[in-house]
Image: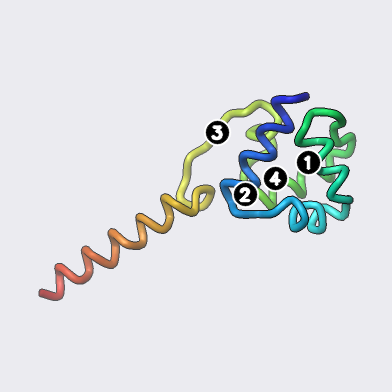
Amino acid sequence: MENFGKRIRELRKERGITNYEMATKLGISRNTLTNWERGIKEPHAVEILEEMAKILKVPIKSILSGEREISLENNPVIKNLSERVSRLEQMLKNL
């Protein structure tokens, strides 16, 4: 489950969520989350995976299989750029 842990860590970091925040939201210890991310252990409850998917704003299959869905909601960098482009377009219309 090393790949599972790597995906969790990558998704968490992409969203700017600390391991402390993630663990707190999941109701687990930081050590437990660290063990998952390192591939030492894995969660056994579907409810934990569901909550993790909500926090990370991805489908559960993305966490389990590694399939990545790129969308504005899932990627804050793309969302930020899109908002900036929209503001620039609006400014150009007003000229």
Q: CA distance from mark 1 to mark 3?
A: 16 Å
Q: If you read the primary sequence from the N terminus, does the residue marked by circle 1 or circle 2 appear first?
A: 1
Q: CA distance from mark 2 to mark 4?
A: 6 Å
94 above or below 39?
below
91 above or below 71?
below
- Label 2: element kind: loop
Viewed as shown, does residue 91 lie left or right of 58?
left
- Label 4: element kind: helix
Identity, as a three-letter code, of the amino acid under mark 3: Arg
Residue 48 rendering spot, x and y as whole percentages: 83, 44
Name which residue lies at 68% across and 40% down.
Answer: 9
Name which residue lies at 73% across and 32% down.
Answer: 5
Instruction: Mark 4: give few (<14), some (14-19) or many (20+) Cα within 10 Å.
Output: some
Asked whether 58 or 9 is in front, the reply is 9
According to the image, label 1 marks what residue? 49
- Label 1: element kind: helix
Viewed as shown, does residue 57 lie left or right of 79?
right
Pointers 2 and 4 in contact (CB under 8 A)? Answer: yes
According to the image, label 4 marks what residue? 53
Q: CA distance from mark 1 to mark 2?
A: 12 Å
Instruction: Mark 1: give few (<14), some (14-19) or many (20+) Cα within 10 Å.
Output: some
Q: If you read the primary sequence from the N terminus, does the residue marked by circle 3 or circle 4 appear first?
A: 4
Q: Which mark is residue 68?
A: 3
Identity, as a three-letter code, of the amino acid under mark 4: Ala
Q: CA distance from mark 1 to mark 4?
A: 6 Å
Q: If you read the primary sequence from the N terminus, does the residue marked by circle 3 or circle 2 appear first?
A: 2
Residue that extends furthest to the bottom in the rendered view of this protein: 94
Residue 50 rendering spot, x and y as whole percentages: 76, 44
According to the image, label 2 marks what residue? 57
